């Protein structure tokens, strides 16, 4: 699933760890308090629509959005994971 979304081999472990921490690898995970949704816990959830209209049900769409987000905000999955480990969010 991670490879199909364009995540490189060297990023897989960090991306997987981040996904597990955020959503336990459930594409329909939803935080009832914030409304964060999906594998990456996008907030607001609708941000993922920028990668495709099937963002609610397609893990590849969610992961493509996640990759774009972590690269723009943190520079990559390793940096996003390190931030998450320090702050319990990313």
Image (cartoon, rainbow, N blue to C red):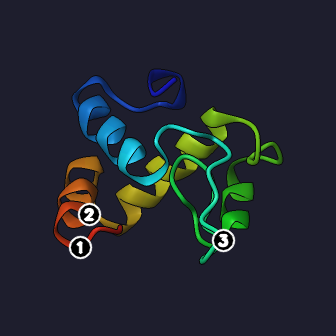
Residue at position x 24%, y 54% from top?
81
Nearest to the observer: residue 39 or residue 7 = 39
Mark number, residue 84: 2
In the depicted structure, whether residue 31 falls above or below residue 7: below
Q: Find disc 1 in the rendering and name its residue.
A: 87
**Distance of label 1 from label 2 (alpha carbons):** 5 Å
- Element type where label 1 sits in the image: helix
**Distance of label 2 from label 3 (alpha carbons):** 19 Å
In the depicted structure, whether residue 89 falls above or below residue 71: below
Extreme residue toward the bottom, this view: 33
Residue 26: x %, y % from top left: 58, 39
- Element type where label 3 sits in the image: loop
- Element type where label 2 sits in the image: helix
Residue 79: x %, y % from top left: 20, 57
Q: Nearer the viewer, mark 2 or mark 3?
A: 3
Disc 2 and disc 3 in contact, CB within 8 angstroms: no
Check disc 2: other Cα within 10 Å, few if <14, some if 14-19, many if 20+. some
Say which quarter of the image contains residue 33: bottom right
* Precedes in sequence: disc 2 or disc 3: 3
Disc 1 and disc 2 in contact, CB within 8 angstroms: yes
Nearest to the observer: residue 78 or residue 86 = 86
Say which quarter of the image contains residue 20: top left
* Precedes in sequence: disc 3 or disc 1: 3
Extreme residue toward the front, this view: 32
Residue at position x 45%, y 22% from top?
3
Q: Find disc 3 in the rendering and name its residue.
A: 35
Tell me: 87 left or right of 35.
left
């Amino acid at each position: 699933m991670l490879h199909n979304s364009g995540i490189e081999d060297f990023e897989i472990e960090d991306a997987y760890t981040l996904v597990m921490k955020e959503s336990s690898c459930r594409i329909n995970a939803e935080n009832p308090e914030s409304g964060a949704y999906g594998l990456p816990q996008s907030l607001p959830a609708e941000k993922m629509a920028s990668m495709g209209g099937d963002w609610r049900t397609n893990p590849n769409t969610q992961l493509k959005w996640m990759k774009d987000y972590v690269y723009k905000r943190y520079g990559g999955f390793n940096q996003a994971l390190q931030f998450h480990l320090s702050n319990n969010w990313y």
